[in-house]
Amino acid sequence: MSEEVTERPGGRSRLNRDRVLRGAVRVADAGGIGALTIRSLADELGVKPMSVYHHVANKDEILDGIVDIVFDEIDLPEVDGDWHAEMRRRASSARTVLSRHRWAIGLLESRTTPGPATLRHHDAVIGTLRGAGFSPEMTAHAYALIDSYVYGFALQEASLPFEGPESVGEIAEPIMELMAAGDYPHLVEMATSYYIRPGYDFGDEFQFGLGTILDALARSISDDVGGAR
């Protein structure tokens, strides 16, 4: 539980660890993880750099803390719920959270001192899969597969040169000019019949791929049980 933020007489919040970490998230959201330094964090908080060190020992502790904040924002699956629906809800939530904190995509699994929200998250995912009947081995396979898909899709989505379906046409037009010579017929067919048609949104591909993965994993439960007999 974070420390309570108290107010100084002038109305300014007293610095505490939670406020430091949330300031670090704002810096990373605005400029990427490379922009996060003790000095930039102090500037965000309106304090001197030495004041930050009263609440966090170093940048590694800050990274551990902000990763834990991100995990805390992702919906936890209900261990006793329908695993298929819970994994879909959790994966969709993770994608949404990573769209807010793009710097976190490559950082979530990098920390060697995970915080309580991180551990709670992993425990709930594992518990949901085990409760569904997955063996320990298949639980590991399923967890790795789902997260590889979620993180990979989030990274691809963050790297796209357009924001939302309304800007696809602007980006596609000069690319289509490069295909005008007829050397890339399959690309032209896909672009004209699907990608640049009104209403296409790359983000819609997420649910299709996730559903395919979860359906395949559902079939693997019976195969796993059958193989153990």
Image: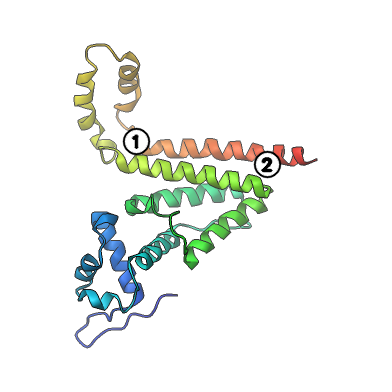
Which residue is farthest right? 229
| Res 11 quadrant in image | bottom left
Badge 1 amino acid: Asp
Q: Say if residue 228 shows up in the picture.
A: yes
Which quadrant would the C terminus be assigned to in this image?
Answer: top right
| Res 190 quadrant in image | top left
Which residue is farthest top? 182
* Spot occupied by residue 44 in the image (x, y as percentages of width and height): 21, 68
Element at label 2: helix
In the image, residue 135 above or below residue 173: below
Q: Nearer the viewer, residue 65 or 162?
A: 65
Q: Which residue occupies 57% across, 60% down?
A: 123
Q: Which residue occupies 26% across, 41% down?
A: 163
* Spot occupied by residue 79 in the image (x, y as percentages of width and height): 61, 57
Which tag is nearer the camera, tag 1 or tag 2? 2
Name the residue tied to disc 2: 221
Q: Nearer the viewer, residue 56 or 222?
A: 56
The answer to whether 15 appears left or right of 66 in the picture is left
* Spot occupied by residue 168 in the image (x, y as percentages of width and height): 26, 33
Q: CA distance from mark 1 to mark 2?
A: 33 Å
Q: Nearer the viewer, residue 116 or 89?
A: 116
The answer to whether 216 appears left or right of 72 in the picture is right
The label number, if any, that marks residue 76 in the structure image: none
The label number, if any, that marks residue 201 in the structure image: 1
Badge 2 amino acid: Ile
Q: Which residue occupies 35% across, 50% down?
A: 99
Crowding at mark 1 (Cα within 10 Å: few <14, some 14-19, many 20+): some
Which quadrant would the N terminus be assigned to in this image?
Answer: bottom left
Crowding at mark 2 (Cα within 10 Å: few <14, some 14-19, many 20+): some
In the image, residue 200 above or below residue 178: below
The answer to whether 203 appears left or right of 51 in the picture is right
Q: Which residue occupies 20% across, 76% down?
A: 48
